[in-house]
Image (cartoon, rainbow, N blue to C red):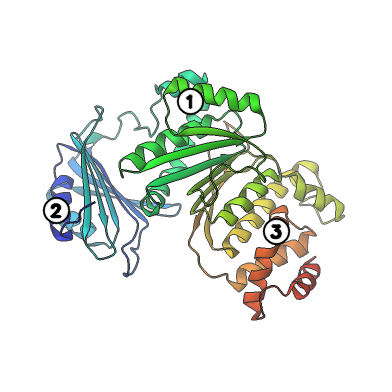
Amino acid sequence: MPTTDLASALADVRALLLDEQHLVRAVAAGRRRGVQPPEHERVEVRPVALRSGPHLQVLFRSGPVVSTRNVPAAEAAAVVDELLALPHGNWHVETAGETLQLRVTKKGDAQVHRAAREGTAPAGPQAHDRVKQRLVDPDDPVFRVLGAGGDKRRQVEAFVRQLAPLAPAVLEQAGPVVRAVDLGCGNAYLTFAAHRWLAREAGGREKELRTVGVDVREDVLENGRGAAREAGLAGLGFARGSIAGAEPFEEGERPDVVLALHACDTATDEALARAVRWGAPLVLAAPCCHRDVQRQIVAAGERGPVVRHAILRERFADVLTDALRALVLQLLGYRVEVVEFIDSAHTPRNAMLRAVRTGSAPRAEHLAEFDGLCREWGVQPALAAELAAELDAVRSALAGRPAGDREAGDREAQAAL
């Protein structure tokens, strides 16, 4: 794609942001190469109509923290100039008539893609009591094909809202073909939703999306293939196999996005381990039951009132398992958030691990926290067993000894228990 002067490209973005009659929304994300990263991971801009008149609403997102600023139209130009001066690497702007994608190159130039915008999304200042804008159209034919009711559609919308803040940066960094895999896809409601949303975002960047749902049941996969054909979803396929053993892509190809949604018990750990070994940039896992750690707590004997009663033990095992999973992922170069996936009225299994690969060095305090929890509760989580070699390398690095000194690593693991 040809490049253009960054200042001129940002001037075009500025004009769109200040066109309150036609602006729908805009998003700034990512970081520019060789500069200090922006304070906020993502900035979202849209016009709103308040009682006091038209405003420009700016949402600043840093992980799970969101802050909002409503700027009167008369002051919008100064605020837009401040936003454009931030070192974000990507701008996505939607107006009533077009979509503009701006990416800052390694050399500091701009690559700009403009395309006519389909649909009839409202433009201009929107009242705060308007119908909530949805990331997945509830009338999408995919839902009809899948036979999904209202509750399932709400889960799909909630899932995509967890995916949406993190995926754009991954899509920008991916090659011309973006790959996503759903390990243990089951009936594939969320596989379809992820593919629909990611395909739209990838297409706006002139990239191709390939999504593969993996499951052990051939009847489930065949239903998914038929639904994909009926819904006209190109690039969505299904592969039979276990989470630990399936090969969803050709040799040498690795996924950019790994999903594992409601994989039962240690199947979630198998999925996370595969994601780590693939070096997947983005991982979303919504665990199901956590029986493995719960059994180990019981086997370890009496440990106080927190786990004395079965229902408390079950709930605590959920928390402990996901806390240990998060620590393992952090030790292996991921930034991790554990967030609420959807309201518990829809499903009690509503926690989600969102992990973004940063490649950051392991921290001794995280290893100490992990070992301390394992020792205190007498458990060894399945994810640590799956990634024993990788964690041994972490221990070696933090201890300053050569990687692969398994004898010392084994002694430390035994001591932790």
Q: Residues within 10 Å of mark 3 (few under 14, many from 20)?
A: many
**Would you name the residue on which mark 1 appears?**
228
Q: Amino acid at mark 1?
A: Ala
Q: Earlier in the sequence, mark 2 or mark 1?
A: 2
Note whether 209 is above or below 392 in the view shown.
above
Looking at the image, which residue is at 80% across and 73% down? 411
Q: Earlier in the sequence, mark 1 or mark 3?
A: 1
Please give the label number shown on residue 77. 2
- 321 sits left or right of 70 in the view: right
Please provide percent x and percent y for residue 280.
52, 53
Find residue 100 and report its image quarter.
Answer: top left
In depth, the one of 378 and 397 nearer the eye is 397
Please provide percent x and percent y for residue 146.
51, 21
What SS does tag 2 mark?
Answer: helix
Q: Residue furthest bottom?
A: 400
Please give the label number shown on residue 151. none
What SS does tag 1 mark?
Answer: helix
In depth, the one of 228 and 104 nearer the eye is 228
- Mark 3–mark 2 distance (CA, rounded to whole Å): 52 Å
Q: Residues within 10 Å of mark 1 (few under 14, many from 20)?
A: many
Please provide percent x and percent y for residue 46.
25, 43
Can you tell which of label 1 and label 3 is closer to the viewer?
1
